Structures are given as C-alpha cells and as structure tokens.
Amino acid sequence: MTSFSNTRLLIKILASSTLLGCSDVGPNNRNEVEITQNTETSVLADENIQKIYDTALNGLHSYEITKSLTTEIGPRLAGSRNEARARKWATKKMNSLGFKKVRIDNFDIPGWERGVETASIMSPSRQQLFVTALGGSVATPAKGVRADVAYFENFDALTSSPESGLDGKIVYISGKMKKARDGAGYGPANQKRRSGATEAAKRGAAAVIIRSVGTDSHRFPHTGQMRYQDGVKKIPIGAISAPDADQLDRIFKDGKNVKLNLRLTPKSVGPKPSGNVIGEIVGSEKPDEIILIGAHLDSWDLGTGAIDDGAGVGIAMGAAQVLLESGLKPKRTIRVVLYGSEEVGLLGGKAYAEQHNDELANHIVATESDFGAGKIYGFQAGKTTGSKLFVSNYASMFKGLNIAAIEGESDGGPDIGPIAALGVPTVRLNQDGTDYFDLHHTPDDTFDKIDPDAMAQNVAAYATLIWLASETDIDLRGQ
Amino acid sequence: MTSFSNTRLLIKILASSTLLGCSDVGPNNRNEVEITQNTETSVLADENIQKIYDTALNGLHSYEITKSLTTEIGPRLAGSRNEARARKWATKKMNSLGFKKVRIDNFDIPGWERGVETASIMSPSRQQLFVTALGGSVATPAKGVRADVAYFENFDALTSSPESGLDGKIVYISGKMKKARDGAGYGPANQKRRSGATEAAKRGAAAVIIRSVGTDSHRFPHTGQMRYQDGVKKIPIGAISAPDADQLDRIFKDGKNVKLNLRLTPKSVGPKPSGNVIGEIVGSEKPDEIILIGAHLDSWDLGTGAIDDGAGVGIAMGAAQVLLESGLKPKRTIRVVLYGSEEVGLLGGKAYAEQHNDELANHIVATESDFGAGKIYGFQAGKTTGSKLFVSNYASMFKGLNIAAIEGESDGGPDIGPIAALGVPTVRLNQDGTDYFDLHHTPDDTFDKIDPDAMAQNVAAYATLIWLASETDIDLRGQ
C-alpha cells in the first residue's frame, strides 16, 4: 500500500467528474483544480495501479487513437471499403504501439448500402422531412410510395390495433425515448425500429416511418438495424428526426389528414468482406490465459463513428498501451479485439465465438467499451459468482476515478455476448450514457463531441481492470 | 401609479429570467415560483402597463401564432409557393385577431432555388461532407467540380494572399464564429459568406466552401445570402457544417493534400411574386400617425423558420393582439408589417420604403423583432436624440420584465433599415442571442426550439413599447 502521492491529479479527477452530463466539452475545457495540501491518502492500494493512473490521466491515448481513426478513415459501414481500410489502420496502429500477434480474422457478411432517401409531406402543406433508411430495409419503388399516413402514438398502439385495415398506407409510429444514465430507454424505444416493419406489414401497410430512436432535438434521423420476420412481407422502413416527428404529431393533433411521399433506395449487395482485428500483450507467466478487451471498428455510415464506437476502439487500445507505457508485465495475455460488423447484427462477435471456440475455455474474462465517450461511474459483475467476487474485491481500486461497484448483473457488452453465452465470464465498466443517444447512429456522431478528460478516465479504468484481471487469483468462472 | 398586485407573476418573471441561455426549453419547463408575501411594489408605473403584463404573461399569443405558421406552412423561401401561402395565412390570422385594413403589398423578386448539394473528400480518404449552397450562388457543372483544395484559415488569410495562384482549385475558408449575447460575432464571420466567392474568383479558383457562419457543433451547414462583385467571375459557393470543417482542419493539420468533389445545382428562376402583409389597430385620436412593428414572413428553405423569423412574426402580431385583448385604445395607429423576402436582400423592407414613401413622415417610430426567440434584456434607442429621450424616459416601464436601458445607438432591425435611412426613428428591444446562431439558417430552425415563457416576455415588452409609443408626447424625430 502506498499513499497517494499525486494529490493534484486526484483532485482534478474529482473536480472534473462534476462535468458529467456536458455533451459538448472540448479540449479547452479541462477542469483543473490545484490544491496544495493532501486531502486524502491511501486511495490507491497498489503502486502499479498508481503507475496506471499517472500514465493514463496525464496522456491522450484513447483521444489520439480515436482522432486518428475518425479523421483518417471516417465512416466505417460494415462490409464497406472504409471498414476494410480501418482494419489496415488498426493493424498498423497496433504494431506501432508495440502489440504482438497482430492479425485479422476475416469473415464475410451480407452487404447492405444506403441509397437516396427523401420524404415529403404532400398535404396539408408541402414540407420536407429528414429521413434515413433503417439498416437492412428494403427499398420503396424507385419513384417512392405516395400514400395517406396512419398515425400510431407508439409501438404498443400499433401492435394492439387490429391486424388489418392499413392497406397501402404509410404507417407512422411516434413515441419519445427517455433519457437515462444507463441507457435504459433504448430497449423500449427500439421495439418500433426492430419490429415496426413487420407489425405494419401484417396490417397491410406499404411502408413505415418511425420517430427516431434517440433523445436529441436536432434534425438528424437515427439509423440502426431492423429485422424482418420470416413469412411476413418485407416493406421499407425509415426513421424521421425528432423535430420532424414533432411536426407530424402537431399536424395530426390538428385533426388533419396527412399524405406523404417516401423514397428510400437502399439495397442488399451480396457478400462483403469484414473482419476482427486482434493484437496482444503476451502474458509473462500464463500466456495461454486470455483477458479480452473489446470494442467495434465498424460504424454506421452517417457520422464518422466517434462515440459509436471509435471511442471504444481508442479506449480498448489505449488501455493496453498504458500497460506497456507503464512498464508493467501482465502475467496473463491481454487481447484487444476490434470487432467488425457489430452494427448489423453482432456479426464480428459471432464470428469470434466460432473462430476461437477451441480457446474459449482459456478466456479468463471479457470486457467491452461500446457506450460512447462519457465518464465511467460504475463497475459491475457479469453472471458468474466469480465475477461478483472480483468486482467486490477490487472495487476500491477504482475509487480514485470516482467509480463505484454497481449492484446487479450486466451482460458485459454486445460483441462479447456470443462468448459470454458460451461461458466466458464478463465484467463491465458503466459509462454515463445520458447524452449518448443524442448522437448515436446519426450524422452528428463526430470526433468534436469527445472530451479528452473523460477519455483519459476511461483508459485509466480499463487499464486498471485488465491489469487486475491479469494478476488476480480469483476464479471468475466460479459459480 | 399603482402598486403591483400580481406578485406571483412578477416573481415568475424574475425566476424564469435565470433561464436565459437555455436553448432547448419546452413548454413543460415553465419556471414558476409561488410566494405568498409581497416583496416589491410600484414596479409598474401605470395600470395600463399592468394590463399588458397580465395579458401577455398569462397567454401564449406569440407561441401559438408561431406554432401555427411553422406547422401549417413550414419553410417559406422568398418567392416560393410557401411564402405566398404564408401571406394568405397572415391575412387570415390578422383578420381573425381583429386587425383592420389587412392587405398585401405585392412586389416581384429575382427567384433562386436550391438544387442538389453534395460534397465529398475524395482523398486522402473518401468521406462525405454536409454542404449547402449559399443563397444566390451559381451552380457547379452538373457533374460537380473535382479539384485540389486550397486551405485558408480565415477570410483575412485569403484577402491578404496574392491575387493569383488558385487556378482551378476549390478554396476552403475556415475560421470560427464567436458566441455573443448581442450576436457581435456575426459580422466578422459573415465576411467570408458575403465576399468569399469574389475574393477566390479574383485568384482563379473554381469554387469555394466555407466553414458555416454559426456557433453550433452539429452537422448542419448554415445557408445565407452571398453577393457577387460586378466584373468578377461568378463561381459557386457553399457552406459546410462545423464538424466537417473541424475534420478538414485536422486533415490539413496533418499535412495532407485534400481533393474534393463539390456539386451544387442551385438556379436563378426569374421573377417571382413576394409581398409584405400589413394589418393595423387604427389609432383612436391620431389615426394617420403610425407606430410600425415589424418582422419577416419569409425564411430560408432548410428549416421551418421558427426562430428566424416565425418568432418575430408571432411577437409582432402577438403584441398588437395583447393591446386588443387588454381593451386598450391606442391614440396612434399600430401597424404590424410582416415583410417578405428579407433573407435575400431586405427586398420587402426596400419595397415598403418605396411603396409607402409618401407617408413615411407620419411614421412616429419603427421597431422590429428579428433575432430569435430568446428573452429580451435591453431597450435601446436609434440614432435620433428623440429616441434616446424616449428610451431613458420609459426604461422603468420594462423593469418588471428584467429589461434595462442599453447605451449606444441601434439600427433598429434589418427590414426597417430602409425607412430608418429615410428618417423614420427606431427603437430596439435587444434579445439574448447567445444561442441564436446555433440554429439560424439551418435545418434545425424548428418550432421545438422555442420557449413559451421567453415568447410571452417578448410579447409583454413589445406590447408595452408600442403602447408607450402610441401615447407618448416625446417627439422621437427630435435631433
């Protein structure tokens, strides 16, 4: 046990933590509070953890990595040329950081590309709406669908309506998503995105528009993957921005009939190459035992994938980089996995589970950063008793970062879901996602939204986590 | 003098004034503080002013008018069918509110319409930029301009560069606009929008893109009118969004060459009809003496023109409506003028000055609301000594609205500029425009951005102003 020798640093962390919730903080807003006397000691239990803190919090590891990815490559749609370029970028970056065994696990995916997307209210007054096709949607006829609109105030109103009567209509599903630190509003709001087309098609509709699954009040529609149900006609589905949804809601509230012209021309484009990029710090004592830290390299095509999930890429790589820079030699292997094709159905995570099936028993624990660039407030176990023991045993190590143990079980993250289902234990560091869905899946997901202080705190936390996982004697698989 | 009998109302005003600067406040955020004891008396000097306050602050006059205009008509580009529909809407609304002598002053304008607008970085990596043509811009060739980009960090860097050497290039002019309550950053930032095409064309450039004149960090480019200089080649000019400008700046900072493809297909479309809509409360004693309160009915085509200038339309009409509802009989005539075609060169203001030239001597004072929907903090004279006397004499009447006299001379507003130049005195109520340029001239200028409390404060202030101007014995023309 060492006393905390860098009090200025600690106070900086505590002070800047009050910034949580600010979405638009740039590099010039670093909130530093100088003090001259010690206010706390023994916050850090181990000199190695202190090294990690010092290295991470005084650096811009993840910030620079995310900047490089989003600036040099930009959008990275699953299966696209840019996603392939991002894989090359990642292997080069991993090699330059000193990672070992850098390689790409290739796999193919069904391709999908966005086309023209326009929507206009034709009556009662001609007005353009901002619309985007949901991922996987089929196209409208080339000239669009021109039809009366059937209004549903939310997804439940549609599903509880009779299974007929919407022949040839454009269904509009409204309903706002609630903001929450843990993103709890996403699941309920997402039902209309996932299943809106199927439920409307069952009732005879020709097409669907939904109020975007998001929490902002800007004119950007949010995209995201949708699904068709086997045996139900596939109809096109798009999302309109929140202000456009407000506008439609007002017009319907006035009792007016609405006629809309909707044109979406996305298309399936056959098999496309994707892949997971892997790099390691090889364990000094137990090289076959794997601590997996993941994020996903692909993004939606509208923005440059900064918070989803360029930030996670930066955090995962940055955390391993911090261990290297700190001169620490983890006993177990730290494996950074940058998944491909997450957005279109966790295809990289599924491919990893298949391709690495024979070594999953050696995966000690997996963790993932895929919830933006906000500060971390919680440390949460997965489903095993061992992971709960791990969290309770080491929660104090995160106190200096203003991170506390969180009750309950987490699923770890989307990409590590497939290996978690096959028995790999997970732990999670919970980011503040209050503003995440203001930007998520929109053109506005760009690098300028990222706060370097929050990124540094994330890197410190993840570096601490993977270090502890590498050294621990706790059996995380223990039931 | 009467004591202030509605203390709850006063406290509500004072409390809600702390909300200044919040851009995204909806109807549910009304900030009401109830108290049971009197804390202030004699704030209001006149029982008629108190009637105005009571009527305006307990109503939704401007809020409902702006909602109706932006919802029922939507965007209102100068010379467009929607602008014509807005004139009909306005005459109907004025008649329904009880205004008299409602009519349209017609005039023609040179039409301009937006076309396709796309921009992509072709190298070093293919990325889409969000671009919009500036108003009045000529088109690129149908397939676009594909060229190397010449970077200038701001407009001064371009104008101080040699008048040659940019043959065939696309000039990119960066440079951020500063936020300010009074919008002081707009003039300097706007130089590149007004004159960027001319300065680049003098140096041989094929086209220009500028960092949007705006203060937000969203992916919306800001449009606005540009000008060509006689004798200099007309080249196309567009604005890119702030995050896209940040992206380009980072790429140039990395020392990379940038190749861009820019496609803009706006076109001039010959003479189009526009007009000013006028309605009055006829003066009870001096019907020929006119108090003019203005705003503009047209908007840019990207948003629905809520803050620019649907809010002003609501405030100007709402202020007159409040006088009618309060049962006040102004001695002079209150003339509400909703100008057409402001955005494309103050054409409605110029037409009014011509068409009403013979009665300008009877215009006692003119005022205008065209700076968004933020709360008013200041009351400012125009250029005459009489208007300064008017402001200093009546400033106390606005104290209950948290409005204070402001030093210096204002120009009153854009649409009343042409009549001010011909000798009509002006006064101005200064709105907080800190967030105005986050939305101004973008697709994000929509009704959901408007705060009903701020609107009510504006209406109370303008109703007070036009009432005082109707009753005053001060000669505002006095030098």
Image (cartoon, coloured by chain):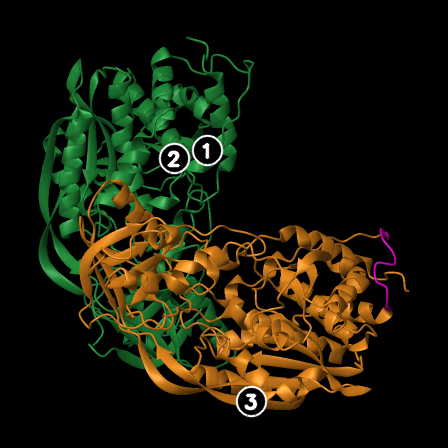
Chain colours: A green, B orange
Identify which residue is drawn at 24% across, 55% down: A301
Secondary structure at numbered mark 2? helix
Asked if the residues shown at circle 2 and circle 1 are in contact, with their CB atoms under 8 angstroms apart, the answer is yes
Magenta-colored span = B37-46
Identity of the amino acid at label 2? Answer: Pro
Magenta-colored stretch includes residue B38: yes
Above or below, comparing residue A375 to residue B272 in the picture: above
How dense is the environment of label 1, judged by Cα within 10 Å: few (below 14), some, or many (20 and up)?
A: some
Disc 3 is attached to a residue of which chain?
B
Residue A202 locus on image (x, y percent) = 28, 72
Q: Judge from the rendering whether residue A63 lies leftward or rightward of residue B3; answer left or right.
A: left
**Image quadrant where residue B77 sits:** bottom left
Q: Which mark is residue B105?
A: 3
Residue highlighted by disc 2: A452
Above or below, comparing residue A435 to residue B377 in the picture: above
How dense is the environment of label 2, judged by Cα within 10 Å: few (below 14), some, or many (20 and up)?
A: many
Asked if one can make out residue B361 in the rendered structure from this viewpoint, the answer is: yes
Residue highlighted by disc 1: A30
Asked if one can make out residue A168 in the rendered structure from this viewpoint, the answer is: no
Residue B76 locus on image (x, y percent) = 45, 77
Query: How many angstroms separate mark 3 from mark 2 (CA)?
Result: 56 Å
Between A342 and B165, which is closer to the camera in this rendering?
A: B165
How dense is the environment of label 3, judged by Cα within 10 Å: few (below 14), some, or many (20 and up)?
A: some
Query: How many angstroms separate mark 2 from mark 1 (CA)?
Result: 8 Å
